[in-house]
Image (cartoon, grey):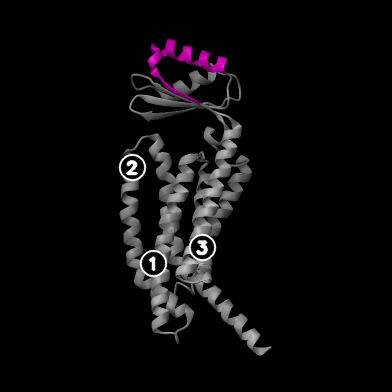
Amino acid sequence: MFKIVEKFKYTILLPVVIILIAAIMLGVHGGFEQDVEFLGGMTMYVDMGSEVNLDELANFVESNTPENINPVVQRSEGTQVSIKTNPIETEVREQLQAALLEKYGLTEEAILQVDNISPTVGGELKRQALMASLIAAVLMLVYITIRFEMRTGIAAVVCLIHDIIIMIAVYAIFQIPINSNFIAAILTIIGYSINNTIVVFDRIRENYGKNKRASFAEVANMSIKQTLKRSFNTTITTLLPVLMLFIFGVTSIRQFTIPLMVGLLAGTYSSVLMAGPIWVALKNLQVKRKQKKATR
C-alpha cells in the first residue's frame, strides 16, 4: 500500500539530520563563508595568457598583500583568473597589479576588470536578497490561497522554506561561499518547487472532489502516487543539463549550478514526501477545531 502520509515521521528525519549537521558546522566555523559581494572587498579579473598554477598564484598574491586579506584565486574562463580579497587600499591594489604584471610578464591590458565592493553595499545586497525571497513566498501564498485554499498555501510555503533551508544547510556544511549566484538560485528554485507542489495539490483537489468520503490521508496518498512519475521525470530532465553545466562550465557557472542541483533535489523531496502530509495535518486540525466548536 502506498502510504507517504503515514511514513512522514520517517521522511522528515533526513532534512532534520541535514539541518543539525549544518548547525554544528556553523558553530565550528563561526558562521557562513561569504563572498566579497556580501562581505565587501576587491575582485580582479586577469588574463594570464597561459595556464597557471592557481596555488602558486594564490601564494604570490598573499605575499604581495597585507595580512588578513585572505585572497581567493579561481579559474574564470580559458586563461583568465579571478582574484578576490578583503577590502584593500587603492595603493595596495596598484602594487599588487604591478607585481602581477612583472612576475608573469603581462601587459596593462591583462588586467581585464577590477571591482571594489564596500561592506555597506554587501549588507544592502543581503537585505535586498532577503526581501526578494520574502516577497516571493508571500506572493506564492496569496496565489495558492486564491487558487486552492489557505491551508494548501501554508503547506506549499512550508515546503518552500524547507527547500531554502536545505540549500543554506548544504552551503554551511561544505563552507561554499554565499554570493549573488546563491540568491539567484534560491529565487529560481522557489519558482520550480512551487510548480511541482501545485501539481500535487491540483491532483489532491481533483481526487477529493470525486470522493469526499475518503480520508484526507487516502486522498493525499492517491494523489502523490499519481503524480510521482511526473515529478521524477521533470526533476531528472531538469537536473541533467544543470549537471552538464557543472561538469563543463567555468567557475562562475559552477557556483550557480551547485545550489540549483541541491534545490532541485530538495524541491522534489518536499513536493513528493512533505507537501501531502503537511496538508493532511492542517486539514485534520481544521476538522478537530470545527468539532470542538460544534460541541460547545
- Quadrant for the C terminus in the image: bottom right
What kind of residue is marked 2? Leu
Residue 236, percent from left and from top: 33, 56
What kind of element bears circle 2? helix
Give the residue type at disc 3.
Leu
Q: Is residue 35 left or right of residue 229?
A: right
Residue 132, which numbered label? none
Residue tagged 2: 245
* Residue 274 visible in the shown view: no
Q: Which residue is farthest right?
A: 296
Q: How far apart, in angstroms, are the residues tagged by discs 3 and 2?
A: 32 Å
Q: Residue furthest bottom?
A: 295
Report the residue marked by disc 3: 141
The residue lying at 41 percent from left, 26 percent from top is 81
Q: Is 75 included in the stretch rendered in magenta?
A: no
| Segment colored magenta | 90-115
The answer to whether 102 appears left or right of 226 in the picture is right
N-terminal of the pair, mark 1 or mark 3, is 3
Write the residue at 38% across / 16% down: 109
Q: Amino acid at mark 1?
A: Val
Q: Main secondary structure of the magenta part?
A: helix
**Residue 190 visible in the picture:** yes
Q: Residue at x 45, y 41 (%)?
A: 181
- Determine if the magenta segment contains residue 95: yes
How much space separates mark 1 and mark 2, taking CA atoms?
A: 27 Å
Q: Quadrant of the N terminus?
A: bottom left
